[in-house]
Amino acid sequence: MQIAISVRITLVYYGISDMILTHIDIGSILTRRVNLELVRRGVLGEGGKIFYYAGSQSEISDILTNTNKSAKFMYPAVFDIVPQKVSVSGFQREHSFSICIVNPVIPNSTSQEREKKTFSPLLRPIYEEFIAQIMKAEFLEILSYGVPSHDYYDNYATSDDQDMILAKYNDVISAIEIHNLKLTVNTNLCDDLIINLKKEGCR
């Protein structure tokens, strides 16, 4: 059984630069920063690691459902679902993509057990820190007051969507989904900073 957080993000770029942060750069940087903070707070434990993977939904689903038996993931993991849609209008580039954060759980757990053992101690702290890192990221511009607008869903895999979830991830899924999150990426960053950010995401 897998527990997943699905995140759908829309990123808006203003201006065009020869060197910009890609969606994979942004996902890996945020994941690393979430990882470091959750280790510091003891949520993941000393030496804990969140693994980052980029791939299509079918590639990821094939591994999770054991269709592809030659590959496997390490957990907890952040999946960056590609390819992404890019809408271009003048100097504005709008990037939309999905992120899933997944972790194995004990099979046949009830909703109350999942809440106690996974949602409260792990999934919500990851979600909250993910939003916190967005708010603090020097390469993002927050255009409104407070947390960026987005839709948030708790899914315990006990609803009518269970068959669809099983087809993607294998076994029962508990999930937090975030949709319609719009972020503006600062494209006026100097090349040296962008290079350092890209290196940070690769560590």
Image (tube, rainbow, N blue to C red):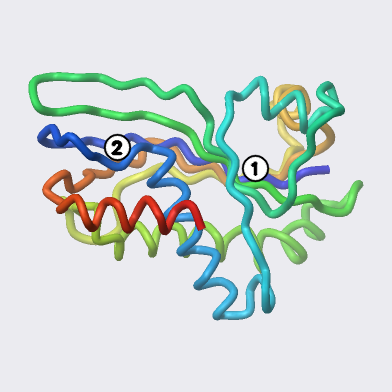
Classify residue 192 by image quadrant: bottom left
**Residue 78 percent across, percent down from the top left:** 59, 46
**Residue 111 percent across, percent down from the top left:** 78, 52
Classify residue 150 by image quadrant: top left
Kind of residue indicated by mark 2: Leu
**Residue 198 percent across, percent down from the top left:** 37, 50
Which residue matches tag 2?
11
Question: Which of labels 1 and 2 is toward the front?
Answer: 2
- Asked whether, in this view, residue 182 is left or right of residue 189, the answer is right
Q: 105 or 32: nearer the eye?
A: 32
Secondary element at image label 2: strand
Kind of residue indicated by mark 1: Asn
Q: Earlier in the sequence, mark 1 or mark 2?
A: 2
Which residue matches tag 1?
155
Distance from the alpha carbon under mark 1 to that under mark 2: 25 Å
Secondary element at image label 1: strand
Q: 168 or 111: nearer the eye?
A: 168
**Residue plotted at (84% across, 35% down):** 171
**Residue plotted at (9% across, 27% down):** 91
Count of marks placed on residues? 2
